[in-house]
Each structure stands twice: as structure tokens, then as C-alpha cells.
Image (cartoon, grey):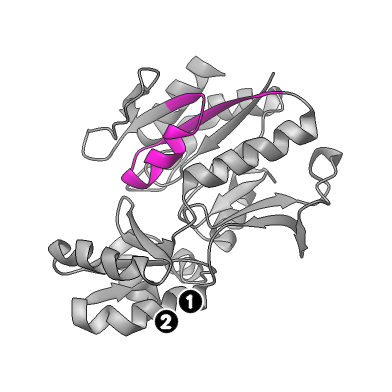
Amino acid sequence: MKTIVFTDLDGTFLNHNDYSFEASIESLEKIFNEDIPLVFTTSKTKVEVEELQKKVGIKEPFIVENGAALYIPKNYKKYDFSFLESVGEYHILQLGVSYEQVLDFYNLYKDEFQMLGFSDMTIAEVEELTGLPSEAAKTSKQRGFTEPFVIKDARVVKKIQELAEKHQLKITKGGRFYHLIGENQDKGKAVKKCVAIFEKIYNDTINSIGLGDGDNDIPLLQNVDVPIAIQNNKGGYVTIENPKLQKSSFKGAKGWNEMILKNV
């Protein structure tokens, strides 16, 4: 049996406030030494994940924008992924819709419901809302599939959801933003597809470990063998109906490190 680790980033692998992963170094080394795929499973964009992977020193498969697409680097561990679509340096499996389709809906209703999405935010506004430095804030606006947004009155989100469903879209909630995404995507669906691909490649069963801290991580936690809730920035946990659910004692990277050492 092979192991794969699927992890959310903000508030899980990365601290909520400073985006540091320094506290996870010990567990990262264990993952590297045991040659375990570490699949970032995030609401972040492809470019953002590529930048983070450079900082961590890895080139691994990753899932972007809340399950919109799975990217696997070409020649990854010298396995043949040619049955997937080829785009640039990657093999890709797309589950989400185009960014253009998402923006068509967003632009139709943004004024009526006072939504402010990334496409309309300045770099300074993204910096203020995320705490990201300027370059990272700029990178986060380079989206391919989904639109994060804030809203003045959260009570209208249900109405927006009803309208979104008529356009083959839906809304999910992350740590800081709501996200307008394709109806057939979430982190859990992408994880299931990824596991199936690697079971085919390895010709072996997969022990999937998943870590997350937000509501948009619930599908991820519901679709792994070892679900782990990382304590969120408010000191609470997401909950799922699963007796296997583990909870970290610490927030962010420290909690991530704790739980990886416990389970890998």
C-alpha cells in the first residue's frame, strides 16, 4: 500500500497570519525521506502553488482553486501519465469550468448583491484582505477557474447560490472568502480522481491522508482514509460525521507537523 498526503494550505500547512511553514520542517523531511507524494489541495492558483513549491523545494502534483484542476508534472517519478491531457509542463485533469464562465455570472449579479471579487479588487485591496505581500497578492489575482469574493451581507449568499445553480456554478466558503466555482468540482472530487490515477500508476492501493481547517476542506476530509482537522485560527475545528476524524492540538504549521509525524 502506498501513501499520499493531501493538504490544504492557508491555515493548515501555512499559518493563518504569517503564511509560514517553518514549524513543519521535521514532518516535511519525513515525507521526503519516505518518498510520499505531497499534494497541495488548495483554493490558491496554479502560479501561487508553483511559487510555494519553489520555497518548499518540491515539484509535486497539486490541486488548485478548490478542486478545479489536478496538475501532475511531466516525468513525475518517471511514471507515464500520458493518458491525461498535456498542457505545458504538466499533465492535467480539469474538473472546473473556465474563469470566463464564472466571471459572466459574477458580473451579472455583483452590483445587485454587493459582491466584491478578486477581478475587481486592486492589488492593495487583496493585500489588505489577505495579509499577502504585494507580489503574492498580484499572483493570487491570476486565476484560471474560480472567483473569490467578499460580500457586505452574508444573508444573501443563499440567494446567490440558488442563482448560481442555474448557471452550473456553486459557492463554497474558505477561511477568508466565499468562492464562486463550477458545480462539478470540489476538493474531495479532485482527491478521489487523483487517488484513482495513482492507484492505476502504482498498481497498488492508496492510503490517503488529508489535512484541512476550513469549510471548503470538508469534501477533502470526507474522501480520504485518514481525515485530519487542523485547529483553525479561531481555535475551533471543522466537523464531519466520521469517527476516524483526528484533530490537531495546535494551529497551522505546528498542528500540521504534529499530525504528519503521528500518521506517516
Residue that label 1 marks: 101
As helix, strand or loop, the secondary structure at mark 1 comes to helix
Q: Is residue 218 magenta?
A: yes
In the rendered view, would you say 12 is above or below 162?
above
As helix, strand or loop, the secondary structure at mark 2 comes to helix
Q: Nearer the viewer, residue 66 or 125?
A: 66
Residue that label 2 marks: 104
Q: Residue at x 51, y 17 (%)?
A: 263
Mark drawn on residue 28: none
Residue type, numbered disc 1: Gln
Neighbor class of circle 2 (other Cα within 10 Å; few <14, some 14-19, many 20+) is few
Q: Can residue 192 be seen in this view?
A: yes
Q: In which quarter of the image is residue 258?
A: top left
- Please give left or right for residue 154 compared with residue 118 in the image: left
* Span highlighted in magenta in the image: 205-227
- Image coordinates of residue 217 in percent, x first then y, are 40, 42
- Please give left or right for residue 22 compared with residue 177 in the image: right
Residue type, numbered disc 2: Asp
- Image coordinates of residue 190 in percent, x first then y, are 56, 46
